[in-house]
Image (cartoon, rainbow, N blue to C red):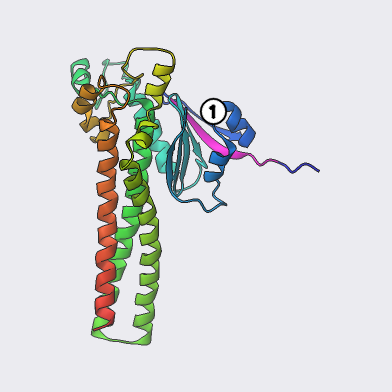
Amino acid sequence: MKSSVVSRSWAVFDKNGESAVVDLDKYGIMKRVPIHSRDLRILDPLLSYPSAILGREKVIVLNLEHIKAIITSEEVLLRDPQDDNVIPIVEELQRRLPLANGLAERDDDDGSQPGLRTSEETDVEQTEFPFEFQALEVALEGICSFLDTQTRDLETAAYPALDVLTAKISSSNLDRVRKLKSAMTRMTSRVQKVRDELEQLLEEDDDMGDLYLSRKSAAAVSSPTSCNVVPDLFHDSPTISSKLSRTSRRSTHHGETDVEELEMLLEAYFVQIESTMNKLTTVCIENVARIHR
């Protein structure tokens, strides 16, 4: 008897920020996007795969804890969009992608809307980041912020517990600190996995080059050397990609092997995750020092 194939919920976002939630099994996904079944296994939450940012011929496979996505040069498929931890990623993609294409609705009464750039501002702020990097940035920002928030929560709980233990050594106080130490050890492992994946990617130009889906697609149809790109008009707060606009414009014509813009994006989030790791290390050192006094 043939085993049933389970469908999962996926949110699909296109370049215009249009989104829909669909139920797809693995065959439905492989029919929709060019991805191998072995890469789909990486996104299975029931299987223990490490953090991964993998560039394939036409897709980026993203496995960053609860953020499991397939990114193409045209759309993003995000797994389990109703998950509480994934909802912020869904909302951020819905917010940013229309802005990136200048498609946010304007007020019909006065022809403008607070926060939207003028055409002159758009010319200045426009980035050359392709769609896949806009989606990648949302995921990186999401996972780094998520892990940092959880680390700060542990940090907030740890120092008072250590102070109490220093004032009075008791079995209950020791037990509380040991539980916090175990939680910090687990958190350190989670942060380390994301950090290591970013570091490994930064060390390999070829791997970074594999993430340039729009560039590869353009080259495949013998289009001009510049990538298929979309403007980035994020208006609430400056993102890493918006800060790289000048660098991006300079590097657009440097050829297919240039990875400077992506390297700068990854480096920014590597620094952020490294800062989170340092917080955990500091708390762990303080923990050991207090216990062994």
- Give x and y (percent) for residue 234: 28, 30
Q: Nearer the viewer, residue 271 or 237?
A: 271
On screen, residue 251 above or below 10: above
Q: Is residue 7 visible?
A: yes
- Give x and y (percent) for residue 186: 40, 63
Q: Is residue 276 a member of the stretch shown in magenta?
A: no
On screen, residue 99 above or below 262: above
In the image, farthest residue toward the right: 1
* Secondary element type, mark 1: loop
User: Is 7 positioned to the left or the right of 124 in the image?
Assistant: right
User: Is 74 positioned to the left or the right of 144 in the image?
Assistant: right
Res 105 → quadrant = top left
Q: Nearer the viewer, residue 218 or 45?
A: 218
Image quarter of the N terminus: top right
Q: Nearer the viewer, residue 150 or 219?
A: 219
Residue positioned 34% across, 19% down in the render: 227
Label 1 neighbourhood size at 10 Å, few (<14), some (14-19), many (20+)?
Answer: some
Image quarter of the C terminus: bottom left
Q: Is residue 9 a member of the stretch shown in magenta?
A: yes
- Give x and y (percent) for residue 261: 26, 31
User: Is 167 positioned to the left or the right of 145 in the image?
Assistant: left
- Which residue type carries mark 1? Val
Residue positioned 22% across, 31% down in the render: 244
On screen, residue 227 above or below 236: above
Range drawn in magenta: 5-14
- Name the residue that disc number 1 marks: 33
- Give x and y (percent) for residue 116: 25, 24
Res 225 → quadrant = top left
For the stretch drawn in magenta, the main secondary structure is strand
